[in-house]
Every structure is written in C-alpha cells, then in structure tokens.
Image (cartoon, rainbow, N blue to C red):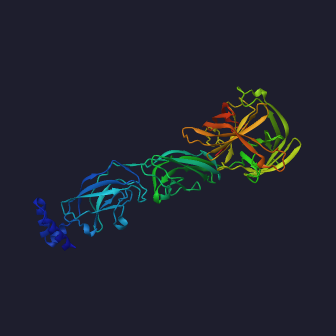
Amino acid sequence: MRSYILKALARRCAATVGRLALACVVAVNLSPEVARAADAYAAAYVAQNVPALVEVFKPASASVTMRNTGTAAWIAAQGDVFLATQRPQDNYYWCIQDNPHGMYSGNRVLLPHDVLPGEDVTFAFVVKPLSCGFAATAPFQFRMLSQTHGTFGEETPAATIVVSTAAQFVSQQVPGTAPAGATIGVKVTFKNTTDVGWRSADGYSLGSTGPPSNTSWGVSSVALPADVAPGATVTFAFNVTIPTVVGPYNFQWQMTGPGSAPFGQASPATPVNVVAAGPPNYQGLWWAAPAGRESGWGIDLAHQGDVIFATWFTYDATGKGLWLALIANKDVTTGAYTGTLLQSTGPPFSSVPFQPLQVTTVGVGTGALTFDDAGGGTFAYTLAGVTQTKTIVRQAFGPLPTCTFAIQSDLTLAYNYQDMWWAAPSGAEPGWGLSLAHEGDIVFGTWFTYDVDRTPMWLSFTAPKTADTSTNTYAGTLYRTTGPSFASVPFDPTEVVATSVGTASVVFTDGNSGTFEYSVNGVTGSKPITRQVFVTPGTVCQ
C-alpha cells in the first residue's frame, strides 16, 4: 500500500511547481522509517456553500471544501476517505444523494479525486432531509473520515440552515375531558408547506407522538385520506378509544413520511382528563329496528340526568306531519323512562315575533322508553286509543358520538352539536325547537314548529358541513314529509313522500350558541339558538 501511495505522489509531483513541489520531493524521498513516522491523516476546514433554506424531502445542493494538512495522500480509488456527517457521526438526517457506497449511502460523501498533502478538495453533493428515515434532527456538520484510521481533522462549523417544517400544524379537535373506555371522534389538521405533494401511496400518514410510541388512544397511525397538494391542508377525522384507566393523558400528533419518519411541526400536547364513565346516555336520533325498516318517522331524545325529553315525529290520520313531545322520567325500579305524550298548537313558523303565549299543550296519551343497551330498545305508546310498541335503534348516518351527562360544565367548549336547541336566550320562545343529530361532518335536523293553521308541523334537513372553513356552518335542503298514520300496522315506508320546500342552515359560534336560518316556500327567517338545558349542566356528545 505504501509503494502505491509513493508512486501516486511521484506522478502528481511531476506536474507540481513551487513550494508544493518541494513538499512532494521531500515526501517521496523520505526513508520508509521517517515516512511512516511522518505519515498522518489531518484536515482543515476551508469553506462551505450551503442553502439558507432546505425543504424536507426536497433535493438541495451543497458543497464543503477541505484541505489535506497531513502527510498522507487521500486516494479516491481505495474508497477509504470520505466526508462524513457528524453529531452523531454517520447520521442520515440530511440523506446525501447519489452515493453508491453500500451502507454508507446517505451519510457520507465520496472523495471525488486523489488529494495530495496541502491540496484542497471540494465535495459537491445533494441533500434531501429526512428521506433516509432518520427522524432525529442533526446539524449540518461534517468531518473527514477514514475507514482505516477513523475520523480526523477539523470539524466543519455548523451551518445555519433552516429546514422547513414541511407540515404546519393548523388545528386539532379533542375534548378536555372524556369518559373511560368511550369511542370519541377527533380531528387533526395539517398544512403541506412544501412544493412537493404528499401522496398516500408513498406512505404519508398521521402518527401519534410520545416515547416510545403513544398507543393510549387505540390507534397510533392514521392513513392519509387523500393526496395533499403543496400549500393544501388535510384533516384527519378519526375515532380514538379512550383509555380505561382514569387520569390525564397526552394527545399529540405529527405527520410521518415514507418509512414512518416523523417530520414537521407536532400538534400541541393537549391533556385529556379521562374520568369514570357515567350511566348510559341515550341522547340522539332513533328509528324503527332493524334500521331502515320504517324509514320516514323517528324519535329524537335529549337525555339529561334521569330525564329524557323525547320528540316523536310521525303522521296523523290524514298523512300530515305530526309531532308530539314526551317528558319521560326514569323509574328506578324498572329502568324505564315514562311520561305523558304532549301535543301542542301555536303560532305559525312565520310569525314575527313568535308569541309563546299562543302555544297550547295538552296531554294526549302516554309513552315509555326502555333500553336493552346503548344502541337498542323499545318505544311503547298509547295515542288516540291506539297502543303500539316499536323496537328502536340509533339512526347512524355517520360515526356515532358518545354522549355523557354533566361531563362538561361549560357547554361553549363542546364541538359536537347533538342536542335539543331552542330560541336564545333560553326560554325566549318556548313551544318550538330544533333537534340536531350530529354524526361526523353531517347534521340531521328536525324542526318542530307550527303550520299556518297553527297545527303541529315538522320539517327536516340533512346538512353537511360547508367547505367554508372560516365559519362552522351546516346547510342543506329543507323537506316537508307526508306518510302513513302513526297507527298504521305495518308502517309502509314506500308511502312516505318528502317534498323540498326550501333551505336550512345552522351556523355555530361556539358549542352553546348559533343561528338557525331557513327559507320555506319563499318565507325566510333567522333565529338565534342555544341548547335546551332542563337538568343542569346538560349533556355533551363527543
């Protein structure tokens, strides 16, 4: 090996002049003993040219110039001398491109040519941060390295390079308090701040953070729902399973790229206080079982404490829409919720102002609700001499939320709007209401009001969340429906006819206030609304 180096030095000296030529002559003519003693690997930093900003996963050019200050030549053909990443040594954070040297591809730069003592060499290379799957951040810093003699010489100064976050945190939606063991819907939104698209096929996803891996929520990775263009945002809407052991838990997420390497900003570490689960809560929209068998009628339940306020929307003997209310108290012995069926008449929906003194309510029958579990039960009633029992289940048109009484004292913090709402301020217009079933990004609303002849009238709408992210708005078509009488056995859903009569929208300013706007056959109106709380502090769905 020594003879090879000496021959190489002799060849290079032939083309060298001046002081460097003298150094070459001395090096070549040294006796073997003296040469071995003088041979040394040493290097000095000369210069570097690096970009001020590098985007994650995007190629960027850089160069580092080093000087051979030792007495040994660096020979490219031997593949022994490299420029290597530091802190830690041979890290893959910068992911050096086009380096075919086996396992060192990505963390070392090949020597471009032989370098004699006293000569400078410029390593020009391309970096692509995080593309090699090294998640920990490392400085842009290098040092010469010989596989035989180890690292040597000066370390390059740490360059000031801003690595773009690539993923910018936008928002996340998670409750501050949740019942143990429940399934809860959450949302996390990130923005792609690079000029490179995130493709689901490449393995981009959302990952939970926390050492060694946060599996508290029953899921540690959520697939990218769709490709995300540069500058676009993506919202991950998914269900988590709340831990069964009470206490505080950390909720935090970060984007992961190919190879499951985390990158970009992480969402804020949000504490979620897990509390003991309360008794079953049945708040929501129910209909006949099995699901869809008697589509066209339903019953909305607002469940607070040991009281259920139910609103049954059905049809009278003429097929006209009819709604009745049931204030049902729990029987501590049987567990059933029973009460009187109430029928109301009142001012037409178009009355401005609405006159609550014109509302008249009378008892017209009885009703009872019993439940086998959180998702099934029966609705038994006696009305106009007709007694029937209906098996009922929850109406699921999206991810069903978990509802809990008294879990949140500040209702403004709620982000699921499933509840019974009425005119704001509370009690301003008793006699009409708006029942909202909120599943995923869809709200199904049933508006209980009065026709022009002051008889009960209900209208319904299915309202997806609008694309306008600046407002929390749900909007859709308003329908008036006719169908078989409540007394019909069997109930024939093919006789149900829904006719579009206008539009409806609900805009929420927080979890306890909003605006209900409607247009019915050319008549428009707008009502401020709030949750109807009849047992403090009310029920929140999550």
Q: Is residue 60 shown to the viewer in this render?
A: yes
Quadrant (top left/top right/bottom left/bottom right) for the N terminus: bottom left
Judge by depth and name the residue closer to the eye, 145 or 295: 295
Furthest residue toward right: 385
Relative to 75, 245 lies left or right: right
**Number of marks:** 0
- In percent of width and height, residue 208 lies at 52, 53
- In percent of width and height, residue 461 lies at 68, 41
Q: Image quadrant of residue 424?
A: top right
Relative to 459, 90 lies left or right: left
- In percent of width and height, residue 488 lies at 84, 47
- Asked if residue 11 is positioned above or below residue 254 in the image, the reply reads below
Q: Image quadrant of residue 59?
A: bottom left
Judge by depth and name the residue closer to the eye, 419 or 352: 352
Q: Is residue 298 shown to the viewer in this render?
A: no
- In percent of width and height, residue 342 lies at 81, 37
Q: Residue at x 66, y 37 (%)?
A: 503
- Asked if residue 229 is positioned above or below residue 481 in the image, the reply reads below
